[in-house]
Image (tube, rainbow, N blue to C red):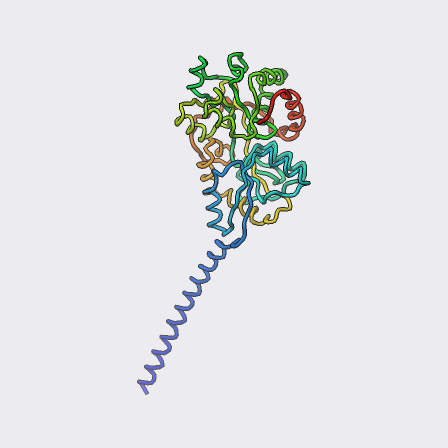
Amino acid sequence: MKKFVRLLLIFALMFTISACGNNSTQETSDGQASETNQSAQFEGKTMNVVATSDEYAELFDAFTKETGAKVEFLSMSSGEVLSRVKAEGGKPMADLWFGGGLDSFMQAKADGLLEQYTAKGSEEVAPEYKDPEGYWYSKGLTVVGFIANNDVLAQKNLTAPASWDDLIKPEYKGEIIMSSPAISGTNYAAVKGLLDMYGNEGWDYLEKLNENIPFYGKRGRDPQEKTVAGEFAVGIIPVDKTAFDAAEENNLTVVYPENGIPWVPEGIAIFKGSENTDIAKAFLDFMFTPEAMEMIARLDGKDGAQMVVPDIKGYDLGLPKDKLIKQDLSTFGSQRTEILDKWNALTSNKETK
């Protein structure tokens, strides 16, 4: 009898251990399943992104790892994006629009081309760097300056320009390259900033600047690339880490114009009616996490991400913030058509190529 009781106790103990082990396994399994489901939330789906460059592949790789969504890129400047979507009757060309001057995003909102979404974490973004209704957000700040080819300057007995006033001097005629502001959000920011800075004399200044520019580039990166190649002495560019890297490698000088630095936040938005709106919304939530914002600051290299989200710092590129032009962002979009129409009339004697 005692032996029988002992056997019953042993079986009971074994059952209890087995049950506990199963429960532990189930909990672990459930936890793993939860993690797996989270990381595979969009497994088998692809988010299409139109971006100004592919410099942010690392960021999107991290998003893929977290959600399972693959990401495919199409590189295009913000002005081109806006023109193409409008030409195609508002048909979305991608799910997510990542990067580019804020003027195009403001115009796209006005044209009903963007999806409204209040992203998690976006409450940390300063009011001036997001749409109050959630149609667009900013991921960082682009500032405008010059890059000068020291070899070309020496050959032509020129010195690097220090200010916008220098660029309209006769000795720089034919030596300056700038992208069309109708295509490049950065160069629209330059035009708009100069108009704000020079006030009533703004269009007179732009007319004089036009006289020194032989043609306008079709891509936002043309001025930097063509100046590096020695085709021009000076390029009007977005000043970022790539500019300083190019300067170091090719005997160039990066210049923050001492009489005023135009600037514009770079936008990000979801295209209205896109196929994978849910993935794009998940990306915005992901983007405003501290880890993702720190990655953007590092990849961006514009010394501007900290101006969008507090306590997030990027590369220290020596930006003299006291030289930033005082600009009213609310007019970036509303005045865009008027400014570009006047710009096109002013520069009608020059090609865009």
Looking at this view, name the residue that lies furthest to the bottom: 1
Judge from the rendering whether residue 17 lies leftward or rightward of residue 83; answer left or right.
Answer: left
Give how far across and how far down residue 198 sits, in percent. 59, 17
Q: Quadrant of the C terminus?
A: top right
Q: Kindly tell me whether residue 41 is visible in this rendering.
A: no
Image: 25 above or below 139:
below
Q: Quadrant of the N terminus?
A: bottom left
* For residue 306, side relative to residue 20 (left or right): right
x and y, in percent, of residue 36 in the image: 47, 57
- Residue at 63%, 34% in the rendered image: 106
**Rendering coords of residue 329 (x, y %):** 60, 29
In the orientation shown, which residue stands out farthest toward the left?
3
Answer whether residue 232 is visible to the viewer in this image. yes
Closest to the observer, 328 or 53:
53
Q: Quadrant of residue 99?
A: top right
Q: Residue at x 49, y 31 (%)?
A: 304
Residue 268, image x, y percentages: 56, 39
* Residue lying at 41% horizontally and 68% vertically, measured from the top left: 22
* Residue located 49% across and 39% down the image: 54
In this figure, what is the number of numbered marks? 0
Residue 12 in the image: above or below residue 201: below
**Which one is nearer the viewer's eye here, 260 or 346?**
346
